[in-house]
Image (cartoon, grey):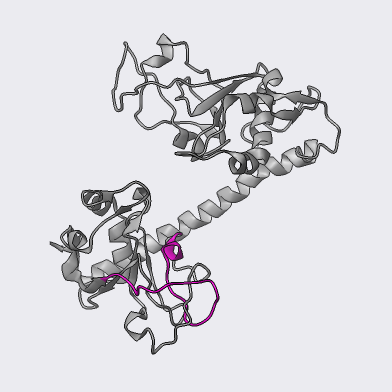
């Protein structure tokens, strides 16, 4: 294992061809920022400029080249993908860097995991220049990042192990996607489409089904182990948007407002996001506080809470599309309270335990 400057591992690191693109489909495809949005080279998300091979010979990618996002929103800086020769000819366009490894010192497949690793990303973050709508990192700074590189045979062995692990994760994501669709399928079978209400269930306002209130807007210290004699977990918007049907953990964020302002929400509360990620819903498994970007819904009947949880999933995209956007998308508490909800009479359901 040796430590070297990142730039020494490449034949070149450079930006792409600066040419106006369109969606005509004429000529060779040209990479765009969104070409690697899913960390793979996506042939359907490219531009065109009626180029042939002679026009762009200097800019045609070679198998093993790595595309690197250096101008993007902060969270997407450093996103990368290896070009493996599909499509056969593709032009390297502006706003993605092409990193062409020296074949005798660096494997492209190892490189992608090196860049995605926490250590590299932490070092990269020191060089990210933040602007209003986007961030960037310069080629000069990128080249200076120190990296640990084993010999080629070890690189290939590690990349193979990580590829197999990634394949397993992809299979798990696919299985979870099927599970995500299961509650809606059961709901439709039991109650019909909630947007058309074919079974003619009585319509109520959501505020008449249970109580709704938003969290508290105040300074929240991070990483504090104890405040006011004990920790009060503060569940953030991302922890509601990016988990399964239940909020089971939080990420080291605490609030001193929970007990002081009577905003501790009990187990079984339905969390509803109203900013950034609109109308994402999860159920608490521990008492917690919310910021004002989350609304808590409480109902005496847990089965009704589960019903509302799945019912809102049918409305999520519609509410997100309708949300006004200023600094970020948001909906207000009054809109949620007035939502019309078809509600079947009380009785046994299968909408429990996340199903």
Q: Residue at 81%, 23% (x, y): give it.
A: 345
Quarter-wise, where is residue 56 in the image? bottom left
Q: Does the magenta portion include 252? A: no
The span picked out in magenta is 14-37
Q: Residue at x 37, y 32 (%)?
A: 251
Q: Measured along the vertical axis of the image, is residue 349 above or below residue 256?
A: below
> What is the residue that sits farthest to the bottom in this orientation?
54
Q: Nearer the viewer, residue 92 or 244?
A: 92
Quadrant of the image for the N terminus?
Answer: bottom left
User: Residue 281 at x, y = what percent?
Assistant: 57, 33
Q: Is residue 284 left or right of residue 71?
A: right
Q: Nearer the viewer, residue 96 or 221?
A: 96
- Image position of 302 (left or right of 198): left
Whether residue 68 appears in this view of the structure is yes
Q: Is residue 150 left or right of residue 90?
A: left
Membership of 24 in magenta stretch:
yes
The residue sitting at 35% across, 51% down in the picture is 134
């Amino acid at each position: 294992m040796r430590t070297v400057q990142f730039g020494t591992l490449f034949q070149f690191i450079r930006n792409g061809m600066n040419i106006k693109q369109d969606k005509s489909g004429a000529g060779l495809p040209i990479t765009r920022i969104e070409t690697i949005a899913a960390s793979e080279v996506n042939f359907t998300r490219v531009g065109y400029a009626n180029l042939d091979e002679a026009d762009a010979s200097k800019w045609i990618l070679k198998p093993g080249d790595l595309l690197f996002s250096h101008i993007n929103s902060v969270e997407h800086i450093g996103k990368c993908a290896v070009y493996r020769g599909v499509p056969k000819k593709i032009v390297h366009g502006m706003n993605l860097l092409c990193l062409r490894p020296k074949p005798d010192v660096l494997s492209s497949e190892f490189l992608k995991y090196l860049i995605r690793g926490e250590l590299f990303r932490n070092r990269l973050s020191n060089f990210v220049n933040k602007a209003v709508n986007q961030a960037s990192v310069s080629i000069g700074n990128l080249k200076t990042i120190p990296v640990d590189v084993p010999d080629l045979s070890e690189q290939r062995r590690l990349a193979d192990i990580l590829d197999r692990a990634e394949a397993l994760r992809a299979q798990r994501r696919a299985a979870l996607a099927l599970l995500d669709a299961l509650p809606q399928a059961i709901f439709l079978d039991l109650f019909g489409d909630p947007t058309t209400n074919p079974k003619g269930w009585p319509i109520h306002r959501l505020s008449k089904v249970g109580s709704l209130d938003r969290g508290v807007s105040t300074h929240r210290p991070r990483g504090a182990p104890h405040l006011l004699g004990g920790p009060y977990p503060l569940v953030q918007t991302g922890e509601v948007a990016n988990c399964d049907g239940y909020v089971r953990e939080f990420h080291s964020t605490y609030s001193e407002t929970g007990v002081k302002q009577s905003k501790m929400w009990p187990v079984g509360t339905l969390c509803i996001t109203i900013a950034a990620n609109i109308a994402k819903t999860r159920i608490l498994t521990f008492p917690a506080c919310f910021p004002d970007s989350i609304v808590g819904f409480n109902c005496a009947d847990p089965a009704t809470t589960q019903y509302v949880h799945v019912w809102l999933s049918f409305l999520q995209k519609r509410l997100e599309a309708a949300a006004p956007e200023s600094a970020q998308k948001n909906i207000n508490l009054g809109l949620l309270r007035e939502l019309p909800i078809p509600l079947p009479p009380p009785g046994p359901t299968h909408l429990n335990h996340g199903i």
